[in-house]
Image (cartoon, rainbow, N blue to C red):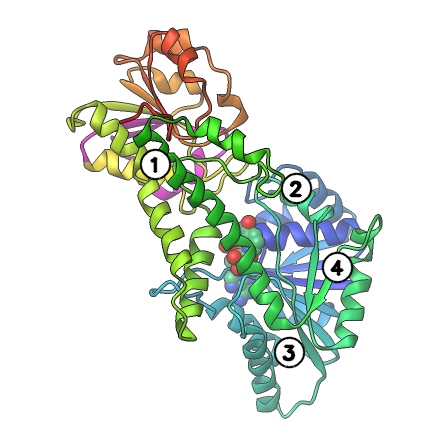
């Protein structure tokens, strides 16, 4: 099929590459001319495991192309995806300016039946607004063209995005048009070969499904952080509690890891946006407010532990940081807990020596050159001249370090384990002080 995708970010580029991989002809449109030029030269602007080979292969074979020319994109695709950003507005609700701008562009150029598919995460009712925006532009041109608007939320995870896209848990199609559903069923048929993964519903339910999924996952994290905060006050180890509850299949082991708070481009903004949606219809979503509040506090947790260790005297101290990305296997720094920690340390007069396998370039793009930040090319290099070590992202490479070597390099041997990666007694036996999250000994 001929497919066009607006937005070549984590969602748009991965979706475009995976649809091209299945034999579709895909054109990706982005307003960022620099990004499009890099993609055309086979350069992938983001780090996402497995993405580079499929983008290159399909670009070289002509299945996948990139352009800034929206009109060309719209004339190409019988299915046109919207996969642009929906960042938080000033009040926390989702800002739809990019989505609606694409919708208006579609209305300005569409000239035959087209299925417009919204993949961006958008508040309930956005499908109607997209439909209106396209219809308004058609009316301005005096044109009469048939089109359908479908809500098809995306559930891929950064770091596993290609795998998730090629083998999705479920494909949610929100549409009241049988014609559009039939087109999408055909497009997604290769992703459904072993068993049917498609769930068809109305647009509003599909839009809410995406927020409900992210809000549920964020709730699990905040719940576990709350248990961790209780655990450390009552002398219990939340890691044992986690194993004790995860073995119940109704609870399960997934997403019950306590830590330094959730970040990323989705959970913080989506929980906020859902809360604002609820408020706009007169419902006070108290649980969502609490999920956010717990996470907000959790993001200062590592700083509080470090500050307490140094009796609040952080000026002149150097903190080594392992992990900058908001989670492993990505270079994404949006709302990353490392940012809260670094910014608080800088404010207190401390310096940071940081290592991350993938996010150093992105960190440099955000913070530029500064005296109180050294971006290191290895974990042990980050320890040179440092007082203590803080673990912020649970990259696999950090799981079995040489504690003796760490102790030998740190001026005040202590590890602040923001992801509970280590066995406290193993760290202490090596002669380091250990601080974790909810491990009954942090107070
Ligand atoms: P992103 O910020 O990585 O990329 C968005 C892209 O859209 C940018 O390249 C930008 O230049 C482009 N763009 C903006 N306006 C445009 C226009 N008018 N025409 C063409 N391109 C335009 O965003 P993302 O992380 O891919 O997220 C996109 C949407 O998908 C968001 O709503 C997000 O909430 C949702 N989502 C993201 C993830 C994720 O893991 N990142 C997962 C599921 C859903």
Give residue 229's mark: 1
Mark 3 vs ligand 1: CB below 8 Å: no
Mark 3, residue position: 109
Q: Nearer the viewer, mark 2 or mark 4?
A: 4
Report the label total.
Answer: 4
- Who comes first in sequence, dot 2 or dot 4? 2
Q: Nearer the viewer, mark 3 or mark 4?
A: 4
Quarter containing ligand 1?
bottom right
Q: Nearer the viewer, mark 2 or mark 1?
A: 1
Residue 360: say if magenta: yes
Towards the viewer: 42 or 349: 349
Under circle 3, the secondary element is helix
What span is in magenta?
348-374
Q: Nearer the viewer, mark 1 or mark 3?
A: 1
Residue 172, image x, y percentages:
68, 61
Q: Position of 8 compared to 259: left or right?
A: right
Q: Quadrant of residue 309?
A: top left
User: Pointer 2 and pointer 1: residues touching (CB < 8 Å)?
Assistant: no
Towards the viewer: 60 or 416: 416
- Who comes first in sequence, dot 2 or dot 1? 2
Q: Position of 414 compared to 86: left or right?
A: left
- Who comes first in sequence, dot 1 or dot 4? 4
Of all residues, the one furthest to the bottom in this rendering is: 142
Mark 4, residue position: 198
User: Pointer 3 and pointer 2: residues touching (CB < 8 Å)?
Assistant: no
Mark 2, residue position: 51
In space, the residues marked 1 and 3 are separated at their CA atoms by 55 Å
Under circle 1, the secondary element is helix
């Amino acid at each position: 099929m001929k497919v066009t995708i607006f937005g070549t970010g984590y969602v748009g580029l991965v979706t475009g590459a995976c649809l091209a991989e299945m034999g579709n002809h895909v054109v990706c449109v982005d307003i960022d001319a620099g990004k499009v030029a890099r993609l055309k030269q086979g350069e992938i602007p983001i780090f996402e495991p497995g993405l580079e080979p499929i983008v290159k292969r399909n670009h070289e074979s002509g299945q996948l192309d990139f352009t800034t020319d929206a009109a060309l994109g719209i004339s190409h695709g019988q299915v046109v995806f919207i996969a642009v950003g929906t960042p938080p507005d000033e009040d926390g609700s989702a800002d739809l300016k990019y989505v609606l701008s694409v919708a208006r562009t579609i209305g300005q150029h569409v000239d035959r039946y087209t299925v417009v598919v919204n993949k961006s995460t958008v508040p309930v009712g956005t499908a109607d607004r997209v439909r209106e925006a396209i219809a308004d532009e058609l009316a301005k041109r005096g044109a009469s063209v048939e089109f359908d608007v479908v809500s098809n939320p995306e559930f891929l995870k950064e770091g596993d995005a290609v795998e998730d896209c090629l083998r999705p848990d479920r494909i949610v199609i929100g549409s009241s048009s049988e014609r559009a559903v039939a087109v999408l069923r055909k497009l997604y048929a290769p992703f459904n070969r072993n068993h049917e993964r498609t769930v068809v519903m109305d647009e509003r339910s599909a839009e809410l499904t995406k927020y409900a999924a992210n809000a549920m996952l964020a709730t699990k994290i905040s719940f576990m952080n709350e248990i961790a905060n209780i655990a450390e006050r009552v002398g219990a180890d939340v890691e044992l509690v986690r194993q004790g509850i995860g073995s119940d299949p109704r609870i399960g082991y997934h997403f019950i890891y306590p830590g330094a708070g959730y970040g990323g481009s989705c959970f913080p903004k989506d929980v906020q946006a859902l809360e604002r949606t609820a408020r706009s219809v007169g419902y006070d979503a108290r649980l969502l407010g609490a999920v956010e509040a717990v996470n907000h506090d959790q993001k200062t947790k590592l700083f509080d532990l470090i500050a307490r260790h140094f009796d609040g005297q952080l000026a002149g101290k150097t903190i080594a940081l392992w992990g900058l990305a908001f989670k492993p296997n990505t270079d994404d720094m949006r709302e990353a807990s490392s940012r809260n920690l670094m910014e608080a340390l800088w404010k207190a007069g401390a310096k940071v020596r940081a290592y991350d396998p993938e996010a150093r370039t992105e960190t440099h793009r955000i913070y530029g050159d500064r005296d109180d930040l050294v971006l290191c090319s290895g974990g042990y290099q980050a320890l040179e001249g440092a007082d203590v070590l803080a673990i912020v992202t649970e990259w696999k490479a950090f799981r079995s370090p040489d504690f003796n070597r760490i102790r030998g390099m740190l001026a005040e041997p202590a590890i602040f384990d923001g992801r509970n990666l280590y066995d406290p007694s193993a760290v202490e036996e090596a002669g380091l002080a250990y601080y974790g999250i909810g491990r009954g000994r942090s107070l």
